[in-house]
């Protein structure tokens, strides 16, 4: 393959901006097309009524030295080291998370605890003697934790988060997300008979003053200073291909259609959308697979509150289905820089599908339902809210249904062999990337284009990650 001189990057999230920054630094001609009105992707930050809101708080945590260096080089003094403190609000009680033995004993109903314990031991014994096959999330949990814990906790919560029965969600998702594989381990840990904390408990994290979006604004500025051009409100709609290569990108901006050609295209748009953009498209199997790949969206209610402080938590999980939101973020505890002087800011995260009833509910009604639910969990802000607004994002969580592997394979088999096109990132590979995974993919994509490093390394990133952002299964 001749060395590329010009590259178009679709998407100005972590993956796309990293690739653009590195390629521009290597002297390539780089154009970034971003559908949104600002950079950052899922990590963008929105200023509102004097406060600053992420799309759900984003912690910087990474085990990758190259990524850590990349972030620290860029942000230096702007990063603060913060301490996570979170609780689970369940059955009208506050459960400390990470779990605390005394707190757990005080809060649990003894009859339920006994029933769950017997059920758990029966399931664990069965699993040892004659392990059952795990197909769905439900199988996975019931086979390991027993039916009682599934019924009182995992089942309803998973259905609330995904809007689908857990029997239709792949067991892979549970295996990746629930890293507390063994309740016995939890018990030993609580009794202090075991020292090692499971990897899900990251007590500290880094966070930029002014919100996570600052990191990506700084990255975009550095890429531009190195010569990259970033066009916002520019939505890629087609990628013309000829044989095994792509020629460029057709995009819409301000109601007009434009076309730019390039030697190489990196896409961080959702994988099914990439398959739909390629022209000519794939065969019937590719079209069917792409159309059936779905994402779970989120809506966020952002509140500015006339109170100097609210809780001592960074966030509170609210797993019960009768509450409209599943997590409460108390922004002052993320960073005081997010709140106006002497005031607080709260963000409520609401799981939904783009276009469904919750997605379309008028803002004032979202506010009303959420304030009533907040009061029910002991945080009555009716008199204190000064300003409110909602934000939403359709492509938050790739949905791993029972057939997701086949669909990813069908689409990737069509897209990946194209010589001068790379699809990378969270949506781009339909996997649960954290920011560091997407940054790493951007670095590897740039290495492939500028220096001929093997592209296959990209597919190894975040293959088996224990993921972050699903409520209380964060690493
Ligand atoms: C609620 C929530 C909380 C999270 N918390 C954390 C956390 O604490 N820590 C962490 O590390 N990670 C967290 N994550 C994950 C993190 O958001 C992602 O890993 C990261 O944003 C992925 O970056 P990306 O560049 O791959 O994709 P994205 O951020 O999705 O960026 C893709 C970009 O492409 C653009 N685009 C799409 N289609 C087109 C098109 N056709 N034309 C032009 N542009 C297009 C989009 O507008 C977007 O800007 C969280 C995610 C969610 C949903």
Image (cartoon, rainbow, N blue to C red):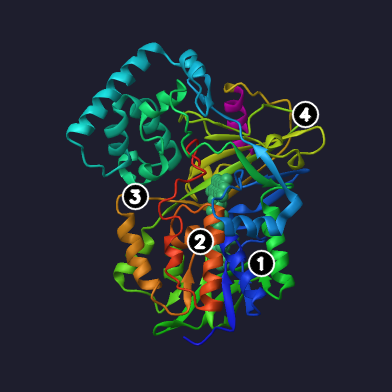
Quarter-wise, where is residue 31 in the image? bottom right
Disc 1, SS: loop
Please identify the dominant SS of the magenta region: helix
Name the residue beneath numbered marker 4. Answer: 308
Alpha carbon of mark 1 to alpha carbon of mark 3: how far? 33 Å
Pick whichever of labels 1 and 3 is earlier in the sequence: 1
Magenta stretch: give its range.
364-375
Pick whichever of labels 4 and 1 is earlier in the sequence: 1
Disc 3, SS: loop
For label 2, being within 8 Å of ligand 1 is answered yes
Alpha carbon of mark 1 to alpha carbon of mark 2: how far? 19 Å
Q: Is residue 460 visible?
A: yes
Disc 2, SS: loop
Pick whichever of labels 4 and 2 is earlier in the sequence: 4
Name the residue beneath numbered marker 3. Answer: 401
Can you tell me which quadrant of the image ligand 1 is in?
bottom right
Mark number, residue 232: 1
Comparing 313 with 156, the one in front is 313
Name the residue beneath numbered marker 2. Answer: 425
Q: Please indicate whether residue 97 sits to the left or right of residue 309 in the image.
A: left
Vertical placement of 91 versus 301: above or below? above
Q: Please indicate whether residue 8 sits to the left or right of residue 271 in the image.
A: right
Disc 4, SS: loop
């Amino acid at each position: 393959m001749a060395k590329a001189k010009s590259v178009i990057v679709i998407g100005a999230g972590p993956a796309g901006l990293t690739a653009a920054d590195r390629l521009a630094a290597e002297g390539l001609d780089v154009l970034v097309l971003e559908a949104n009105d600002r950079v950052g992707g899922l990590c963008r930050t929105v200023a509102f009524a004097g406060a600053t809101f992420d799309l759900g708080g984003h912690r910087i945590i990474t085990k990758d030295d190259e990524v850590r260096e990349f972030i620290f080089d860029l942000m230096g003094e702007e990063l603060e080291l913060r301490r996570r403190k979170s609780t689970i609000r369940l059955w009208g009680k506050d459960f400390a998370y990470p779990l605390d033995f005394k707190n757990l004993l005080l809060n649990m109903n003894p009859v339920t605890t006994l029933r769950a314990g017997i059920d758990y031991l029966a399931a664990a014994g069965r699993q040892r003697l004659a392990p059952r096959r795990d197909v769905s999330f439900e199988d996975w949990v019931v086979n390991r934790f027993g039916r009682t814990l599934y019924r009182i906790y995992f089942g309803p919560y998973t259905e609330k988060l995904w809007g689908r029965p857990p029997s239709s969600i792949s067991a892979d998702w549970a295996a990746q997300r629930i890293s507390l594989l063994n309740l016995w381990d939890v018990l030993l840990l609580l009794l202090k008979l075991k020292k090692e904390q499971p990897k899900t408990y990251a007590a500290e994290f880094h966070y930029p003053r002014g919100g996570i979006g600052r990191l990506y604004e700084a990255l975009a500025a550095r890429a531009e200073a190195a010569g990259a051009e970033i066009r916002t409100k520019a939505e890629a709609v087609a990628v013309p291909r000829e044989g095994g290569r792509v020629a460029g990108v057709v995009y819409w901006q301000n109601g007009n259609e434009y076309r730019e050609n390039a030697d190489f295209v990196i896409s961080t748009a959702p994988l099914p959308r990439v398959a739909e953009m390629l022209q000519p498209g794939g065969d019937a199997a590719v079209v069917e697979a792409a159309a059936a790949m779905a994402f779970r969206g989120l809506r966020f209610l952002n509140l500015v509150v006339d109170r100097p402080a609210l809780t001592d938590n960074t966030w509170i999980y609210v797993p019960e289905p009768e509450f409209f939101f599943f997590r409460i973020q108390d922004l002052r505890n993320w960073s005081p820089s997010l709140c106006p002087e002497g005031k607080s800011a709260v963000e409520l995260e609401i799981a939904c599908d783009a276009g469904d009833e919750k997605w379309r509910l008028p803002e004032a009604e979202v506010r009303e339902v959420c304030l009533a639910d907040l009061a029910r969990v002991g945080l009555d802000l009716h008199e204190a809210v000064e300003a409110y607004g909602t934000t939403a994002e359709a492509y938050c969580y790739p949905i791993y249904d029972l057939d997701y592997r086949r669909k990813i394979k069908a689409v990737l088999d069509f897209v990946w062999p194209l010589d001068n096109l790379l699809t990378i990132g969270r949506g781009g590979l339909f996997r649960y990337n954290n920011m560091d995974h997407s940054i790493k993919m951007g670095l590897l994509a740039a290495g492939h284009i500028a220096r001929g490093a093997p592209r296959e390394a990209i597919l190894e990133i975040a293959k088996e990650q224990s993921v972050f952002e699903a409520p209380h299964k964060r690493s």
